[in-house]
Image (cartoon, rainbow, N blue to C red):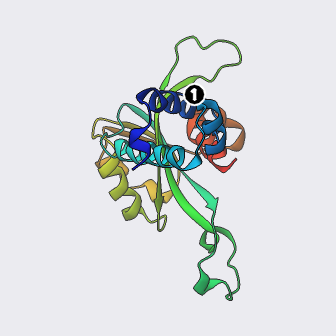
């Protein structure tokens, strides 16, 4: 493949450019930044980096203090369901359910205007439904038993207490989201944007 013959420095520069910004670079922009003439080798390199980064996520479990919530992302409707009337709400065919987990720890003296928590790792996993068994299976696989979970007071999270060190379920009003579950909702909004 062409991308493996690219200079080693291209790989480091591409990783740096892809990970240092909130917004993504297009492959064409990366090609210009690297000063390369052809699009195809850069495209192959970026796809290989994405594959490796995706596989790395499955190698570790989240631990420590964690936030957990679900998000709903608009997706394309499957061809066989295009002629059917759309459902509304959680069962809609054009919404994918995503379980979002973030390691977050409280900061002792946050600077003015900063969040009261600091984030380290985030995982997002597409799930088929919001049933308690489905979410519990994902948490058992992705979260260490020593974790301390904070969630909203959904019945989907009722069985989590058995599988982690502690589970705090709080009724979260919309004005308290930035203090109780800030990083999960920042991750969801950034992904939707």
Residue 53 can be seen, yes or no: no
Residue at image position (30%, 38%) is: 165
Instruction: Classify residue 184 as left or right of residue 56.
Output: right
Q: Nearer the viewer, residue 134 or 81?
A: 81
Residue 83: image location, x then y, percent: 68, 88
Q: Residue furthest front?
A: 37
Residue 62: image location, x then y, percent: 36, 38
Residue 131 can be seen, yes or no: yes
Is residue 85 positioned above or below 138 on the image?
below
| Residue 59, quarter of the rendered image | top left
| Residue 164, quarter of the rendered image | top left
Residue at image position (30%, 51%) is: 141
Disc 1 secondary structure class: loop
Instruction: Classify residue 149 as left or right of residue 119.
Output: left
Mark 1 sits on what residue? 20
Q: Nearer the viewer, residue 41 or 13?
A: 41
Residue at image position (44%, 42%) is: 49
Q: Residues within 10 Å of mark 1 (few under 14, many from 20)?
A: few
Residue 163: image location, x then y, percent: 29, 48
Q: Nearer the viewer, residue 62 or 51?
A: 51
């Amino acid at each position: 493949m062409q991308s493996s013959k690219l200079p080693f420095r291209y790989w480091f520069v591409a990783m740096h450019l892809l990970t240092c910004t909130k917004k993504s670079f297009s492959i064409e922009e990366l090609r210009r930044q690297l000063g390369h003439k052809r699009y195809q080798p850069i495209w192959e390199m970026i796809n290989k980096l994405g594959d490796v980064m995706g596989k790395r996520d499955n190698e570790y479990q989240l631990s420590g203090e964690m936030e957990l919530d679900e998000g709903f992302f608009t997706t394309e409707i499957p061809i066989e369901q295009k002629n059917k009337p759309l459902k509304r709400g959680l069962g809609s065919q054009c919404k994918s359910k995503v379980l979002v987990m973030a390691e977050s720890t409280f900061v002792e003296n946050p600077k003015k205007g900063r969040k009261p928590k600091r984030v380290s790792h985030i995982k997002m996993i597409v799930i088929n439904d919001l049933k308690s068994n489905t979410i519990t299976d994902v948490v058992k696989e992705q979260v260490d038993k020593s974790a301390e979970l904070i969630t909203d007071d959904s019945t989907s999270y009722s069985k989590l207490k058995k599988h982690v060190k502690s589970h705090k379920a709080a009724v979260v009003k919309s004005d308290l989201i930035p203090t109780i579950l800030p990083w999960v909702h920042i991750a969801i909004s950034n992904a939707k944007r």
